[in-house]
Structure formats: structure tokens, C-alpha cells
Image: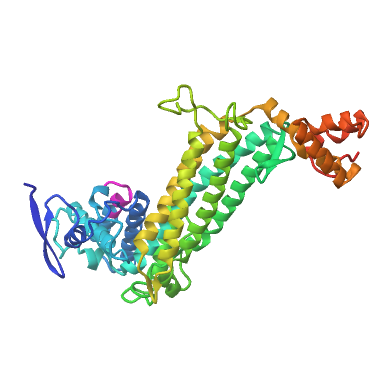
């Protein structure tokens, strides 16, 4: 049998594994919330650790913590931030809406590890208490949303934005490579006027550049931290200047521009910064799904579809059809986009539950937002490295479609008139021949004039058709 020890909280005794750093409140939450088995992500636990360390340093500087105790708390909290104690955070995402269970999980783990570092026994609350010392000047109500902001800002800055830059650059490089590849545009999935494949890919790159700006625009609000508001925004039990000093400590240790929120009541009541960031990720997901679907259409075939581009072959595509290769990377990106769009709905509904002076769905906001950031960043890197960089154009197929599109007649309309152009279009469609063939057969214009009007590269540059 596993050895145990007895830990106590305000509700009485709890049996805890002897080797566990967590205590009674964590043990109660393990019993109370056996719901999904899903735990908080590494980025969130890291944020809790650096916040607890910052709080201990601040309390030491304010003369509220003994130096040895403060040092032990900082060392233990740093181990939490570094991931050395991740197994000590077993709690389910679905728990008390403020996240009290997970805040106390951190407090207990840090307190008991600090005791161990001081050479004392776990559970000696007279020396290091999870509430009185580790949680000094804090409440779950300000620590938990601060951790959401610190984790989200850090992951967006260090992971997502670099991944988006890499993907945007990959599309820009392909746009340059495809600058002279003429093809038919398609509107309503129907043949349209000539463009170049490079122009099409430049649009994809621009989508990502806009999304980078959109995501960056959410960072100033995530930089505002509720720390110091304690229970309801008044800062009860927190010494003067505590929250401002903790935010400054977090800015120094992370290198990110964190500040205490200018209005702690708003910062406690609402999770609007998380909702805003999630909305930017949803917009990004919509763009990624559109791009991925376009690539699937452009590579469709290869003998019976558009087959305008070749995606890198990454794995066999079928367990029954030999030789088949599928657009697996865009398909994976599509699935990530679907999850992120779903997460955004979760964050929005959770954000609605800022009832009076506290939001009571913060754990699910943390989980959904941070998962969206993580999977989007990973998908963008995979998309860039395993798909976009290796895309090749089927130049002849593209040009063949450009010659064949019936909407080349658009270039003739300013010369012969809209109605006459429509007649010529119908004849070309009925005969299944290029517009050029009908123009030549019916001697609508001299051949050299037809050549000038139907210069595909010139048409792809736009302007009035046939202008000199």
C-alpha cells in the first residue's frame, strides 16, 4: 500500500500520499472534480510559479517575510516555474470557477517544497504556511487571472508570433517564385479572369500579416495584471504598492511589459482581454482554414482535378489505394482551425459569466485560450516547414487554364461591347474552345489585335483591357 500522511485544512483532516508536496485542499479537489482528466497546461503552471516567486520577493522587500522563508519560497516557486514539480499539479480543468483549487495546489506544493529546502518536515505550517506565507497579499481572484495573462502574453510572444512570421515569410517566398505563373482566377468557383499564382499566394501572405498585427494588438490589454486586487479589487490584506511591485518584478523577470491594471475592479470583474485575444485567434483560424482549403483545391486531382500546384508528398495517403498521396498538412491545419474556433466560443460564453465582481469560469478560459495559442503556433510551423516551402507550380496546367477560361472575353468587352462579348463567350462554351479560337474564326478582330488584347501577363497586371 502507498504510504500516506495526514494534512489539515479549515475543514479538517485529509489523507495525502506521503511523498506528495500538495496538501489537504488539493486532495479534496482531487476527490471533488474527477471530471475530464485534463490538467492545466505547462504554460499556466509556469506562470503560477513565477507569480508566486514575484510575490515572495515583494513581501520580502516590504519586510513582511523572513529572509530565509522568502528565499525558500522563491526557490520552490522557481522549481514550479521550471517544470520540476509538474506531477504535483493533478487537478482537473473543471473545478471551482475562480480556480481556488489550483491556486491552493500551488500554495501547498510551494510551501511543502520550501519546508524541505529549509530542512523541515512537510506540513509544518508554523514555519511555512500555504496561505499565510506563500499566498501572502494575494487571493485566487487576482492570482488566477494574472496567471492567464502572463501565460497568454508569454506564449503569444515567444511561440505564436514567431510561428506566424515563419509562415507568412514562406508564403511571401512562394509568391515571389510564382510571380510569372499565369493562371485563371476563380470567383464563385467559376472561371474568371487571368491572374498569376504569385498574386494568389501574395494574398495568403497578406492574410497572415494582418493576423500578426491583429494578435499583436491584443498584447497591451494582456499586459495589464489584476494582481493586488485580492478578493474584489479593493486590495484588502495586500500592503500598499504590493500589486504594482509584483507587476514590476514580473516585467523584470520575464522581459515583458507587465503592469498592474489601472482599474482593479474592471480587472477582477471581466476577462475581456482573454476574450479579445481569443477573438484574434479565431480570425486567424478562419484565415488559415480558407488558405488550407484553397491549397487542397489547387492541388486537387492530379488527373481529374485542378492540379495547378504540387504539395510536398509527406506520407502515403491511403491504406487501400496504392500510390495515393493526400494533402495531409492542410487537412491537419483545418482541424486545428476548427478546434480554435470552438475554443473561442467557449471563451466567449465563459467571458459572459463575469457576474458582479468576479468571473467564475476562469479555469476553462485559461485552458481554451492557452490551447488555442499552442496548437495554432505548432500548426503554423508545420504548415510552413512541411507544406508551403515545398509547393511547386504546375506551370503548363496553370497556363492552359488561363488560355481556356471563357472570361478572357472580359478583355474584349471594352472593344466590342458587353452584349457582343457575351455572345462570343456562349459560342466558345458551346464549342468548348478558347475565346481566342472564336475571335479568330469569326474574324472579330485582326490577329495581332487579338494577341495584344489577350496578352495573359498584361491582363494579370490589371487596368483597362487592351490599353497600350
At 30% from the left and 47% from the top, the residue drawn is 83
In depth, the one of 250 and 394 nearer the eye is 394
x, y percent for residue 277: 49, 58
Horizontal relation, residue 274 to residue 105: left or right: right
In depth, the one of 445 and 363 nearer the eye is 445
Residue 11 found in image quarter: bottom left
**Res. 152 in view:** no
Range of magenta residues: 77-85
**Res. 24 in view:** yes
In depth, the one of 78 and 69 nearer the eye is 78
At 41% from the left and 25% from the top, the residue drawn is 320
Horizontal relation, residue 321 to residue 293: left or right: left
Residue 390 found in image quarter: top right
Residue 172 found in image quarter: top right
x, y percent for residue 219: 51, 58
Quadrant location, the C terminus: top right
**Residue occupying the far front of the picture:** 430
In depth, the one of 278 and 223 nearer the eye is 278
**Vertical side of 394 occupied by 297: above or below:** below
At 49% from the left and 25% from the top, the residue drawn is 324
x, y percent for residue 49: 32, 55
Horizontal relation, residue 344 to residue 63: left or right: right
**Residue occupying the far left of the picture:** 1
At 23% from the left and 51% from the top, the residue drawn is 88
**Residue occupying the far top of the picture:** 322
x, y percent for residue 153: 46, 55
Q: Is residue 125 magenta?
A: no
**Vertical side of 89 occupied by 464: above or below:** above
Amino acid at each position: 500500500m502507498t504510504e500516506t500522511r495526514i494534512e489539515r485544512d479549515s475543514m479538517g483532516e485529509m489523507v495525502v500520499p506521503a511523498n506528495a508536496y500538495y496538501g489537504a485542499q488539493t486532495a479534496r479537489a482531487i476527490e471533488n472534480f474527477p471530471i475530464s482528466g485534463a490538467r492545466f497546461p505547462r504554460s499556466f503552471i509556469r506562470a503560477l510559479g513565477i507569480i508566486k516567486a514575484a510575490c515572495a520577493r515583494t513581501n520580502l522587500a516590504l519586510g513582511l517575510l523572513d529572509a530565509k522563508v522568502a528565499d525558500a519560497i522563491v526557490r520552490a516557486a522557481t522549481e514550479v516555474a521550471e517544470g520540476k514539480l509538474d506531477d504535483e499539479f493533478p487537478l482537473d480543468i473543471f473545478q471551482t470557477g475562480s480556480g481556488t483549487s489550483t491556486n491552493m495546489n500551488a500554495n501547498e506544493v510551494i510551501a511543502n517544497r520550501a519546508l524541505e529546502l529549509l530542512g523541515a518536515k512537510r506540513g509544518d505550517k508554523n514555519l511555512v504556511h500555504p496561505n499565510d506565507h506563500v499566498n501572502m497579499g494575494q487571493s485566487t481572484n487576482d492570482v488566477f487571472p494574472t496567471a492567464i495573462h502572463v501565460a497568454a502574453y508569454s506564449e503569444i510572444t515567444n511561440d505564436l508570433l514567431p510561428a506566424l512570421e515563419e509562415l507568412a515569410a514562406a508564403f511571401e517566398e512562394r509568391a515571389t517564385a510564382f510571380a510569372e505563373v499565369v493562371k485563371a482566377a476563380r470567383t464563385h468557383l467559376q472561371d474568371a479572369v487571368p491572374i498569376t499564382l504569385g498574386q494568389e499566394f501574395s494574398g495568403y501572405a497578406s492574410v497572415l500579416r494582418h493576423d500578426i498585427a491583429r494578435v499583436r494588438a491584443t498584447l497591451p490589454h494582456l499586459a495589464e495584471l489584476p494582481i493586488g486586487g485580492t478578493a474584489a479589487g479593493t486590495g484588502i490584506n495586500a500592503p500598499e504598492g504590493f500589486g504594482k511591485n509584483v507587476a514590476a518584478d514580473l516585467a523584470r523577470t520575464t522581459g515583458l511589459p507587465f503592469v498592474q491594471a489601472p482599474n482593479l475592479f474592471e480587472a477582477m470583474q471581466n476577462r475581456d482581454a482573454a476574450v479579445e485575444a481569443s477573438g484574434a485567434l479565431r480570425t486567424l483560424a478562419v484565415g488559415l482554414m480558407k488558405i488550407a482549403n484553397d491549397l487542397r483545391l489547387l492541388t486537387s486531382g492530379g488527373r481529374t482535378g485542378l492540379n495547378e500546384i504540387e504539395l510536398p508528398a509527406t506520407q502515403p495517403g491511403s491504406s487501400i489505394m496504392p500510390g495515393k498521396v493526400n494533402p495531409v498538412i492542410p487537412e491537419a491545419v483545418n482541424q486545428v482551425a476548427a478546434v480554435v474556433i470552438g475554443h473561442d466560443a467557449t471563451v466567449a460564453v465563459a467571458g459572459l459569466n463575469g457576474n458582479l465582481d468576479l468571473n467564475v469560469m476562469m479555469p476553462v478560459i485559461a485552458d481554451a485560450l492557452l490551447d488555442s495559442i499552442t496548437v495554432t503556433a505548432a500548426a503554423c510551423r508545420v504548415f510552413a516547414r512541411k507544406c508551403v516551402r515545398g509547393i511547386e507550380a504546375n506551370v503548363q496546367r496553370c497556363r492552359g487554364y488561363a488560355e481556356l477560361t471563357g472570361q478572357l472575353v472580359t478583355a474584349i468587352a471594352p472593344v466590342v461591347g458587353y452584349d457582343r462579348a457575351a455572345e462570343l463567350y456562349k459560342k466558345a462554351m458551346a464549342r468548348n474552345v478558347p475565346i481566342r479560337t472564336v475571335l479568330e474564326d469569326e474574324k472579330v478582330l485582326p490577329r495581332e489585335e487579338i494577341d495584344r488584347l489577350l496578352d495573359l501577363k498584361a491582363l494579370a497586371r490589371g487596368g483597362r483591357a487592351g490599353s497600350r
